[in-house]
Amino acid sequence: MKIHVTSETGRLREVILGRPESNGPAPTPQQTFDAKSYESASKGIYPKDEDIIREMGAFEAVLLRHGVKVHHPAPVEGCNQIFARDVGFVIDDKIIVSNIIPDRQEEIDAYDEIYSQIHYKQIYNLPEAVHVEGGDVILYGDILFVGQYAFKDYPQVKTARTNRLALDYLAMIFPEKNIIPLNLRKSDTDPYEGILHLDCTFMPVGRGKAIIYKDGFLNPRDAGHLIELFGPQNVFELTKEEMYWMNSNIFSISEDIVVVEEHFTRLKAWLESQGITVETVPYREISKMGGLLRCSTLPLYRD
C-alpha cells in the first residue's frame, strides 16, 4: 500500500474511517478523557450506538460517492473505535503510530491488518516518552503545525495529548519541515474553555484559507501569526459557540470539496462564497464524544 499525505486539502484517494458499532456502555464522567464527553456523561446525553452508526454511515457514503477507498480497523467488541485520527497519522510517506493513553491500547491493535500492508520502514512507533496524537498535527506543505501543552502539570491534564518531546521527535524524522508549535488552552471538564486537539481550533481549507478560533490558543500571538500567514481576508473566525460544536473539525476531500456537519450553516455559507462545494452530514451525536469529522479519519493517500 502506498501512503502519501502532505496537506489537509489534497485530493483524497484512500482513508481509514473509524468503526461506529459496539462502543460499549456509556462512561461515567470519571471514565471520560475529554471535556465534551465529560459533559455528555454528566448530563446523560452520551450518544447511542444506533445514532453513531447512522451518522458515520452518512459520512462514509459521501466519501464513497467521491471515489475514495475506505478502510476500517478490525472490530473490537465493546471498544470505542470512532476516532481513527487519535491512533495514527501520515506525514509525507511515513505513518506515525501514536502513543495514546494506555486505556485505549486495544484500538491500536485493531489496525494491525492495515499496517501489515505498509512497508515496515515507513511505520514509526514512538518512544514511550513521546506523546502526540493526530488531531494535534496539521499539514500545510512544508509546514507542520503541532498543538501542544508544554507545562509542568502535563501529566495531570487528561486533555493534554501532545508534549514538547514530540516536537523534537518530529523534527528528527522530518528535518526539512518547518515545525510550528502552538500551545492550546486546556480544560478536562468545560468544553467551552478547553481545546482537546489543534484541529478543534484551527484548520486550513480550500486554497490558502483557514478556519480559526482565536481564543483556543494560550498565547494570543499564535492566533495572530496564523491570521497573518493566511491573510485576514482568507480566515473564517469562529465564535465560542461554533468552537464548542467543533466547526473547525471539518474534512476536506479536495481543495474544492469539503464535508461539514449539517448544522454549520454560517461556515457552509462562507465556504460556498469561496467557491468550495460543501457536503453536509449529520454528526451532532458523535460530537458529544469530543470529536467530529476530521477526528474520525486517518488519510492514507492524498494527491
Image (cartoon, rainbow, N blue to C red):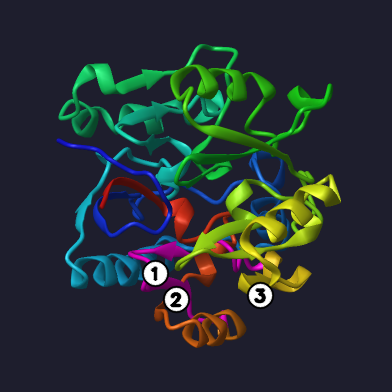
> Which residues fall within the magenta stretch?
245-264
Classify 10 Å Cα crowding around label 1: few (below 14), some (14-19), many (20 and above): some
Considering only vertical position in the picture, is 10 above or below 181?
Answer: below
Classify 10 Å Cα crowding around label 3: few (below 14), some (14-19), many (20 and above): few
Quadrant position of residue 135: top right
Which residue is pictured at 19% across the width and 22% down the height? Answer: 119
Which residue is pictured at 82% across the width and 26% down the height? Answer: 151
Which residue is pictured at 43% across the width and 83% down the height? Answer: 275
Considering only vertical position in the picture, is 152 above or below 219?
Answer: above
Find residue 288 and report its horizontal and vertical position in percent.
Answer: 59, 61
Q: Give the amino acid at mark 1.
A: Glu
Mark 3: which secondary structure?
helix
Q: Is residue 61 magenta?
A: no
Tell me the residue that label 3 is attached to: 233
Q: Nearer the viewer, mark 2 or mark 3?
A: 3
Q: Earlier in the sequence, mark 1 or mark 2?
A: 1
Mark 2: which secondary structure?
loop
Q: Nearer the viewer, residue 161 or 220?
A: 220
Residue 75 in view in this figure: yes
Q: Is residue 259 magenta?
A: yes
Between marks 2 and 3, how big is the CA–CA gap?
29 Å
Q: Earlier in the sequence, mark 1 or mark 3?
A: 1
228 sits left or right of 133 in the view = right
Find residue 38 and report its horizontal and vertical position in percent.
Answer: 70, 51
Q: Give the amino acid at mark 3.
A: Gln
Find out whether the residues at labels 1 and 2 contact each other: C-beta distance under 8 Å.
yes
Q: Nearer the viewer, residue 27 or 264?
A: 264
197 sits left or right of 221 in the view = left
Tell me the residue that label 1 is attached to: 55
Q: Nearer the viewer, residue 238 or 230?
A: 230
Tell me the residue that label 2 is attached to: 282
